[in-house]
Image (cartoon, helix red, strand yellow):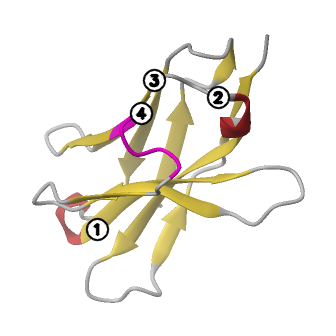
Amino acid sequence: QVQLVESGGGLVQPGGSLRLSCGISGIIFSAHVTGWYRQAPGKERELVADITQRGRTTYSDSVKGRFTISRDSASNMVYLQMNALKPEDTATYYCNARNINYKTIQYWGQGTQVTVSS
């Protein structure tokens, strides 16, 4: 049974920081690109960042320089460090794992809410 379990969301003031965590089980971690997506009300889900087994990262332009994605293969964890948060970062954040050979095979977490507001 594949499970992706996110944690670390919450309410933070503009300029603040949060760290999201995602624990992944039931898949071969090294065979998947892992990442974070987000979806704000009334908007489509979008890629925030992803990272390969070799550590190659991709970031959306809106978060470059503020967010950092990392993964720990020993514990099958994926992290998203979010700094200098803005109100427009408010969204539900989803952890994702995508098979490197079969890109249509992917898994999602249940989502964690991030709200940036004063």
Image disc number at residue 75: none
Q: Which residue is mark 1?
A: 32
Q: Is residue 53 visible?
A: yes
Q: CA distance from mark 1 to mark 3?
A: 26 Å
Residue 79 in view (yes/no): no
Chain-order first, disc 2 or disc 4: 4
Amino acid type of the residue tagged 4 in the rendering:
Arg
**Residue for badge 4:** 66
Closest to the camera, between mark 1 and mark 2, is 2
- Residue at numbered disc 2: 86
> Which segment is the magenta one?
62-68
Residue in the picture at 39% in, 85% down: 103
Q: Residue furthest right?
A: 42
Residue at 36 percent across and 38 percent down: it is 65
Q: Nearer the viewer, mark 1 or mark 3?
A: 3
- Whether residue 9 sits left or right of residue 87 in the image: it is left
Instruction: Say which label, 1 or 2, has the lower sequence index.
Output: 1
Taking the magenta stretch, the answer to whether it contains residue 99 is: no
> Residue 100, relative to residue 101: is it above or below?
above
Closer to us: 113 or 40: 40
Of callouts 1 and 3, which one flags the residue occurring earlier in the amino acid sequence?
Answer: 1
Q: Position of residue 61 (x, y in %)?
A: 47, 55
Q: CA distance from mark 1 to mark 4?
A: 24 Å
Q: Position of residue 20 (x, y in %)?
A: 48, 30
Of badges 1 and 4, nearer the viewer stands 4
Q: Position of residue 91 (x, y in %)?
A: 72, 41
Determine whether, in the image, residue 97 is placed left or right of residue 89: left
Q: Residue at x 14, y 54 (%)?
A: 55
Q: Earlier in the sequence, mark 1 or mark 4?
A: 1
Amino acid type of disc 2? Answer: Lys
Which residue is tagged 3? 83
